Image (cartoon, helix red, strand yellow):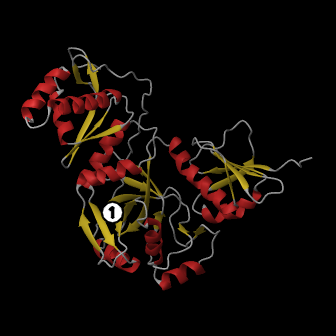
Amino acid sequence: MRVPAVLRDIFFQDVGTPLRLDGADVVLPLLAEVAAGWLLRLAGADLGATPFFTITGLPGDTKLRCESGVEIRSPQLWDPVNAVCDAMASLAVAWPLFDPTLITLHAAGVEMSGRLVVFPNIRRAGKSTLSIALARAGYRVFSDDVVPLSFPVAGPAVAHAMGLAPRLRLPLPESLPADFRAWAEAVPGPRNRQYHYLPLAGQPQHGERLPVGAFVLLDRRDEPTVARLTPVPPDAAMDALLHQNFTRDRHSGEVLEVIAATLARTPVWQLTYADLGGAVGCLEAGFTDVVPATSLGGQARRFGVPVLDFRAASVEGQVVQRAGCVERWIGETLYLADPAGRAIQRMDALAAAIWAMLEEPVTPEELEEALSEAFPETPRETIAADLSRLLSRLAEAGLVAGGATRSG
């Protein structure tokens, strides 16, 4: 007969639902190190509360059963370090559920000259390693993986510290400098064969805030390259930020508005680099003259939620832009969000031109005729097929309506 396990709920500051441990006290000392920047409260389990994550010990097994309460995915069996890692991923999803002013980016964020430099996640770009190298150089790491942002009515976007220790993926590449690998290896912290958490001193506490001073997209090269910062076109920056936003229960039109406004006032750079030391030096040289903000801009905007109950319009008769769409030009690219707030669409030059033609009701045949006159060398059937696909896409996205007048 199984002995009843000890049930514990761990509440994280600002998160209204707990992490539940069911016979899994083995992770408690790991949590104390990994989440050292959070105010935690340990309590007996309230079975009436739905946890954001549950870690369950299994009799006779060193693995722990891990199940997220805020993400739709199958339970997993992990060792204690990976169990904590998985729980912290769900924590990043759970926190914004209780704060409607936040959206969260897959990104790293490091304080430099009084503002946060945000590194949106790009696969194999090395954001975690770079942020830890910057921590070694004396800079504070707000996060190496997830950066929550709020958007004051006035002023720049504001980043919130996660309060979690950064982690390195193991084994460390031989291409990293020997002194960095030796230093990282010597830092005590939870580790297994896959990850090593580094609970570094002097890092920000959960919820500490800083204005965003810049976004930096990482372009790590394998061949020798002199580290350099170059400006990034606004639409490339927009694509990176939209792709890395994983707070999906926010109204997309409002998200489009705040990100467009943020990019209008915040510089975006690309850091091209090969070696870690060169990247750190380049960033230090590039951001020493940033003037710290004197204010965080006051009250933050609260996001609405999308309306999911939606019926697409027919595109067989007249079609017209649906009233209430949000459109923003970012550089040379048009972005659209539907009135229901379900998604953001990126429009190429031709699609943007067709969108402009939809300001007044028009039939697909009339659009086809206009496009055929504009592109006489393109076969009519090609134009018709491409136009049909675009109109279907706009209808499914809730961006166009049928009828003789603009519809709400």
Relative horizontal placement of residue 304, taking residue 30 as reference (left or right): left
Q: How many marks?
A: 1
Relative horizontal placement of residue 23, taking residue 387 as reference (left or right): right
Q: Residue at x 58, y 79 (%)?
A: 185
Q: Which of 158/96 is in front?
A: 96
Residue 155 visible, this angle? no
- At which x and y percent is residue 312? 36, 23
Q: Which of 282/162 is in front?
A: 282
Residue lying at the far right of the rendered structure? 1
The part of the image, by quadrant, that contains residue 78 is: bottom right
In the depicted structure, whether residue 201 falls above or below residue 349: below
Q: Residue at x 59, y 58 (%)?
A: 38
In the depicted structure, whether residue 179 falls above or below residue 122: below
**Quarter of the image with the C terminus in it:** top left
Residue lying at the far bottom of the rendered structure? 179
* Residue position marked by numbered label 1 in the rendering: 216
The amino acid beneath tag 1 is: Val
Relative horizontal placement of residue 71, taking residue 149 as reference (left or right): right
**SS at mark 1 in the image:** strand
Q: Tag 1: Cα neighbours inside 10 Å, few (<14), some, or many (≥20)?
A: many
In the depicted structure, whether residue 267 falls above or below residue 393: below
- At which x and y percent is residue 368? 15, 26
Relative horizontal placement of residue 57, taking residue 212 as reference (left or right): right
Q: Residue at x 29, y 30 (%)?
A: 394
The part of the image, by quadrant, that contains residue 286 is: bottom left
- At which x and y percent is residue 404? 20, 14
